[in-house]
Image (cartoon, grey):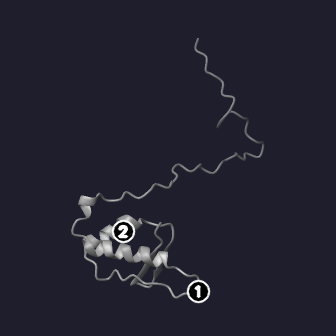
């Protein structure tokens, strides 16, 4: 004779309500994003990317010279090649906040 183990907890372990209502829970999150530091390229991987390095230096200078009531410094990235722009994207990383204005303007917070 085989015995079926009794369940004391979990779905089906409690009698149903007289009105037929069943208790249901919201599903728990299955994934969670966590912070991970950006992977920075090795020195030999950035050879020839002088425009990207200069742009990063300009960003660093703008941040170092920041003053609360001064106008914002702008670092123009429009003249960069795809490889130099990829360096900028790799170093600055992807942020948590983004803005899209129309079809041509996009801004992404970088960490």
Residue occupied by mark 2? 89
**Element at badge 1?**
loop
Check contact, mark 2 vs mark 1: CB within 8 A: no
The x and y percentages for residue 3 are: 61, 16
Is 55 rendered above or below residue 19? below
Is 100 rendered above or below residue 13? below
Front in this rendered view, residue 20 or 62: 62
Between label 2 and label 1, give the one nearer the viewer. 1
Figure label count: 2
- Give the CA distance from mark 2 to mark 1: 28 Å
The x and y percentages for residue 61 are: 43, 76
The x and y percentages for residue 24 are: 66, 47
What number is the disc on residue 69? 1
Would residue 71 be found to the left or right of residue 76 on screen?
Answer: right
Identified at 34% across, 76% down, the residue is 55
Identified at 52% across, 88% down, the residue is 71
Is 23 rendered above or below residue 44? above
Front in this rendered view, residue 99 or 103: 99
Q: Residue furthest bottom?
A: 71
Is 76 rendered above or below residue 52? below
Q: Earlier in the sequence, mark 2 or mark 1?
A: 1
Would residue 8 be found to the left or right of residue 66 on screen?
Answer: right
């Amino acid at each position: 004779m085989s015995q079926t183990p009794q369940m004391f907890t979990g779905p089906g372990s409690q009698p149903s309500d007289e009105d037929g209502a069943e208790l249901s829970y919201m599903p728990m999150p299955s994934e969670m994003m966590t912070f991970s530091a950006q992977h920075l390229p090795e020195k030999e991987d950035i050879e020839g990317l002088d425009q990207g390095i200069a742009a990063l230096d300009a960003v660093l200078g703008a941040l170092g010279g920041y003053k609360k009531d001064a106008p914002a410094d702008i670092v123009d990235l429009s003249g960069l090649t795809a490889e130099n722009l990829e360096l900028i994207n790799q170093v600055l990383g992807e942020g948590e906040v983004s803005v899209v204005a129309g079809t041509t303007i996009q801004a992404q917070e970088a960490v």
